[in-house]
Image (cartoon, grey):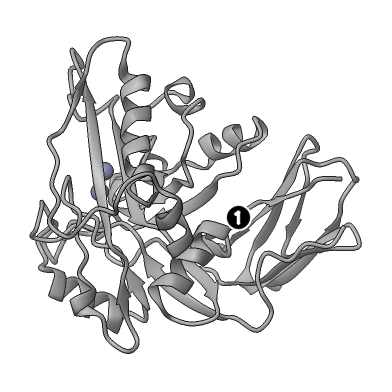
């Protein structure tokens, strides 16, 4: 078995695919967000304002592009906190092929929506309708911050049409890393056979004052391997899972070759191979830091993904390599 999710000659581009501007409840204008991320070494950004689809490609530069996007919300009747136990979905305009296969014309800049309130017992059905609407208008769909939303696995495990799930949300993580986490949900879905990517994103709101002990700005990102920096190349790579998520470390390579899974990365303290149904393997740095690890697969795993962790807790997550033995 030989699988390499990253094409050899392609380039790495760092981006944040979840942010809010003054067009909804963010404190920075789209122009300020672009400037901040561009200076920070990012190459792309989605300004996914609440209930408002934006295509801000007029702000594109030679070294920085915007992906047209939206964040849609659904709340549930009779919940003490209307925003919780509901769903937030990220919708990002898909590749040309995704748009062509969609049933309806793509959303255009400035399209806005009301927030639906699902009746008791109908929330899963309503969530599916929302995903379908986003897919039918040519978007890929991401389940945002499931932990912050206090979702149960049963609230979303049967939903169809999800491309990704947030496994790290910086805005929620300001209140504590567990609040922004999602990787346990992700593994649950993967164990059930879902083919879904893990996403780290800022969910930038820029609401906290400058002297706040922690900001969500530039804390969680994805790094995409693509042939060039164009909307089509980046979104196609996201659709195909040619990226990893991170709050710090870099993943330089990740592949399965002759049934051995291997990874190379920036200096970390721990490299964990998560597999199913076996437990996988964890390699710890022995004194010095670690920049590579490999592990011989048993030959019947359903998938393998890798997690690289620095001593300070900063983490990089690969996407799963799915194994059809
Ligand atoms: Zn949200
Ligand atoms: Zn958001």
* In the rendered image, the vertical position of residue 99 relative to residue 6, given as above or below: above
Determine which residue is flagged by label 1.
319
Q: How many marks?
A: 1
Between residue 137 and residue 307, name the one nearer to us.
Answer: 137
Residue 170: x, y in percent?
33, 54
Residue 260: x, y in percent?
86, 60
Residue 265: x, y in percent?
64, 72
For mark 1, give the secondary structure.
loop
> Which picture quadrant has residue 261?
bottom right
Asked whether mark 1 lies closer than 8 Å to ligand 2, one says no
Residue under the point 27% across and 86% down: 61
> Which picture quadrant has residue 128?
top left
Residue under the point 23% across and 36% down: 73
> Which picture quadrant has residue 292?
bottom right
Residue 194 is at least partly visible in this image: yes
Between residue 244 and residue 118, name the one nearer to us.
Answer: 118
- Relative side of 3 to 170, left or right: right
Residue 144 is at least partly visible in this image: no
Residue under the point 16% across and 50% down: 52
* Image quadrant containing the N terminus: bottom right
């Amino acid at each position: 078995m030989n699988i390499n999710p990253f094409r050899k000659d392609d380039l790495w581009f760092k981006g944040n695919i979840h942010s809010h501007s003054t067009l909804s409840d963010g404190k920075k204008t789209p122009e300020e967000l672009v400037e901040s991320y561009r200076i920070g070494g990012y190459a792309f950004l989605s300004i996914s304002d609440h209930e408002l689809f934006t295509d801000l490609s007029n702000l594109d530069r030679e070294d920085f592009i915007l992906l047209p996007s939206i964040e849609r919300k659904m709340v549930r009747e009779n919940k003490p906190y209307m925003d919780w136990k509901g769903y937030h979905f990220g919708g990002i305009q898909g590749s040309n092929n995704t748009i062509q296969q969609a049933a309806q014309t793509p959303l255009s800049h400035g399209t806005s929506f009301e927030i639906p309130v699902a009746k008791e017992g109908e929330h899963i059905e309503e969530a599916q309708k929302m995903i379908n609407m986003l897919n039918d208008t040519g978007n890929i769909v991401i389940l945002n911050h499931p932990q912050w939303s206090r979702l149960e696995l049963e609230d979303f495990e049967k939903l169809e049409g999800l491309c990704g799930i947030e496994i790290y949300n910086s805005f929620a993580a300001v209140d504590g890393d567990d609040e922004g986490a999602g990787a346990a949900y992700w593994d649950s879905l993967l164990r059930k056979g879902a083919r879904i990517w893990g996403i780290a994103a800022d969910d930038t709101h820029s609401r906290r004052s400058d002297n706040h002990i922690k900001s969500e700005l530039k804390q969680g990102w994805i790094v995409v391997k693509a042939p060039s920096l164009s909307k089509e190349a980046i979104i196609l790579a996201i659709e195909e899972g040619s990226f990893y998520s991170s709050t710090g470390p870099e993943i330089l390579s990740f592949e399965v070759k002759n049934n051995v899974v291997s990874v190379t990365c920036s200096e970390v303290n721990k490299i964990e191979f998560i597999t199913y149904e076996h437990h996988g393997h964890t390699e710890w740095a022995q004194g010095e830091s670690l920049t590579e690890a490999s592990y011989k697969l048993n030959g019947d795993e359903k998938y393998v993904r890798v997690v690289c962790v620095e001593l300070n807790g900063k983490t990089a997550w690969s996407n799963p390599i799915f194994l059809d033995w």
